[in-house]
Image (tube, rainbow, N blue to C red):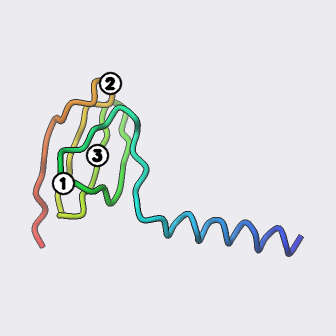
Amino acid sequence: MIGGLVVIISLLVIRLQAGDAPLPAEIALPDGVEAEAVTLGRDWIAIVSRDNRILIFDRETGDLRQEVQMNN
């Protein structure tokens, strides 16, 4: 049981340290944009980029709806 717990924790740590955020297949990011985080809504997908932008895509079509620049 302890061994199983160690394996599960190890897998979580490895997965959480992965460099790339998983993206839904219908989303194509603009050139040069790297995803930091992904949030799913009912009819939208928001992607936080490494350059401090929030890109909001239509969940059905994958079209970019809105782009928001975050201030530092």
> Which three-letter amino acid code belongs to the residue tagged 3?
Ala
Q: Residue at x 22, y 42 (%)?
A: 56
Of tags 1 and 3, which is closer to the observer?
Answer: 1
Image location of residue 70, percent across then percent down: 13, 62
Disc 1/disc 3 C-alpha distance (Å): 17 Å
Note whether 31 is above or below 19 in the view shown.
above
Image location of residue 55, percent across then percent down: 20, 47
Image location of residue 9, percent across then percent down: 68, 71
> Which three-letter amino acid code belongs to the residue tagged 1?
Gly
Tally the numbered discs: 3
Sequence-first disc among 1 and 3:
1
Note whether 29 is above or below 15 in the view shown.
above
Disc 2/disc 3 C-alpha distance (Å): 13 Å
Disc 1/disc 2 C-alpha distance (Å): 23 Å
Image location of residue 48, percent across then percent down: 26, 56
Query: Where does label 1 land, which residue?
Result: 32
Mark 3 burial class by Cα count in 10 Å: few <14, some 14-19, many 20+:
many
Mark 2 burial class by Cα count in 10 Å: few <14, some 14-19, many 20+:
few
Judged left or right of residue 67, residue 43 is right
Label drawn at residue 3: none
Q: Residue at x 27, y 30 (%)?
A: 62
Residue at the extreme front of the image, as rendered:
31
Judged left or right of residue 10, residue 40 is left
Query: Where does label 2 land, which residue?
Result: 60
Label 1 secondary element: loop
Residue at the extreme right of the image, as rendered:
1
Sequence-first disc among 1 and 2:
1
Q: Residue at x 30, y 55 (%)?
A: 35
Q: Nearer the viewer, residue 27 or 56?
A: 27
Mark 1 burial class by Cα count in 10 Å: few <14, some 14-19, many 20+:
few
Note whether 19 is above or below 23 in the view shown.
below
Query: Where does label 3 land, which residue?
Result: 46
